[in-house]
Amino acid sequence: MKWTFRWFGHNDPVPLAHVTQIPGLDDVTTSLLDVPAGVAWPAQAIRERKALLAKHGLTWTVVESIPVTEAIKTARPDRDVHLAAWIETMERLAAEGVTTVCYNFMPVFDWWRSTFDRVLDDGSNAMAYDQVDVDRTDVRAGVEQRIAWAQGYSAAEMEEAFAPYDAMDESDLLGNLAYFLEAVTPTAERLGVRLALHPDDPPWPIFGLPRIVGDEASIARILDLTPSPAHGLTFCTGSLGANPDNDLVAMARRFAPRVAFVHARNVRHHGVRSFHEVAHHRAAGDVDLPTVLRVFAEAGVSVPLRPDHGRMIWGETGIQGYGLYDRALGLAYLQGIWEALNVE
């Protein structure tokens, strides 16, 4: 595995100088969040981000994410313009050695949580999701921007964003994903780039919006859209593991050849469509990370892997879920499992 670590750029309170102190880490997963969605990232800005990381002894080989705009997801008349900008960004990134592209096809929102600071029994806090709370949330009144989102939404913007989905279902969204892949995959293949589609988070419809990347059958259907080696999957154990019906070990075994990137995290279920995030360790939650990694080791999977959301521990503040301490502990845990598997 190539160990990498998510860093959000200049607005990230975690200093790069601290990231470099994590043992066994030499790569950072990042993106240019200040560039508006649908606009090609300037080549100079990409080079500057790469140079900044290099000053700290870090490389940049995974981008997370190049935003897929609502124009593309809803097949607006201007989607080809947005696709051209997306492809141009990918080309400029590849020219600087960024050859894994994590992206998602979630309508309107990226991931969603109903609580961002649930206090756990050990005094740490973590993000949580409860369907009852989600059902009480009036998102049409507007939502504030989250760090991983391209934007926040006013009430008027929310209404405009939701409107196209009133006439769309899952088959329409899948068709728009197929159009996207037909447009971008040939260039990715030519550049040696692996596209890594991220599962829906959580892996079920929210707020009446369609979602199409949530379980084994839906992922198989999407991977069957094209056999290109450039068309791959981000295997996110937290997103997929939020649904206890998903057999992550079986999915890891089936999709191993198409896994291009791994997000490793753990969740604890506590009801129907209700969970909270926990430490990476197997005993902390319901995701069997050691066995998933064993499957990848046996299948010869060698791709970038990063510790995903963690708890906020030891009084750390900052971007909820993206504190330094618990993710660093999680990475050490994952590295230990991987080393033991290789010795074995």
Image (cartoon, grey):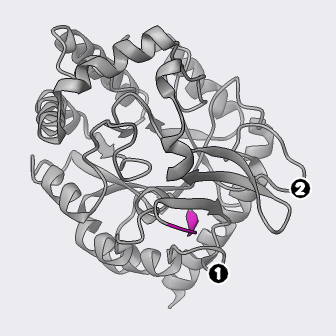
Q: CA distance from mark 1 to mark 2?
A: 20 Å
Q: Position of residue 259 (x, y in %)?
A: 31, 58
Q: Which residue is mark 2?
A: 314
- The secondary element bearing badge 1 is classed as helix
Q: Position of residue 248 (x, y in %)?
A: 37, 72
Give the left or right position of residue 212, taking residue 127 as reference: left
| Closest to the observer, 21 or 247 | 247
Give, as a three-letter code, the residue at label 2.
Trp
Q: Going 22% across and 23% down the picture, which residue do you hit?
A: 74
The residue lying furthest to the bottom in this view is 344
Residue 306 covered by magenta stretch: no
Image quadrant of residue 336?
bottom right
Disc 1: CA contacts within 10 A as few (<14), some (14-19) or many (>=20) = few
| Closest to the observer, 331 or 209 | 209
Magenta stretch, overall SS: strand
From this view, report whether residue 142 is shown above or below residue 42: below
| Closest to the observer, 51 or 151 | 151
Would residue 227 be seen by someone viewing this image from the given angle? yes
- The secondary element bearing badge 2 is classed as loop
Picture mark count: 2
Q: Going 73% across and 64% down the picture, which residue do you hit?
A: 329
Residue 269 covered by magenta stretch: yes
From this view, report whether residue 222 is shown above or below residue 54: below
| Closest to the observer, 157 or 12 | 157
Disc 2: CA contacts within 10 A as few (<14), some (14-19) or many (>=20) = few
N-terminal label among 1 and 2: 1
From this view, report whether residue 64 is shown above or below residue 126: above
Read off the magenta span.
266-271
Q: Going 31% across and 36% down the picture, which residue do you hit?
A: 209
Q: Which residue is mark 1?
A: 283
Give, as a three-letter code, the residue at label 1.
Ala
Would residue 42 be seen by someone viewing this image from the given angle? no
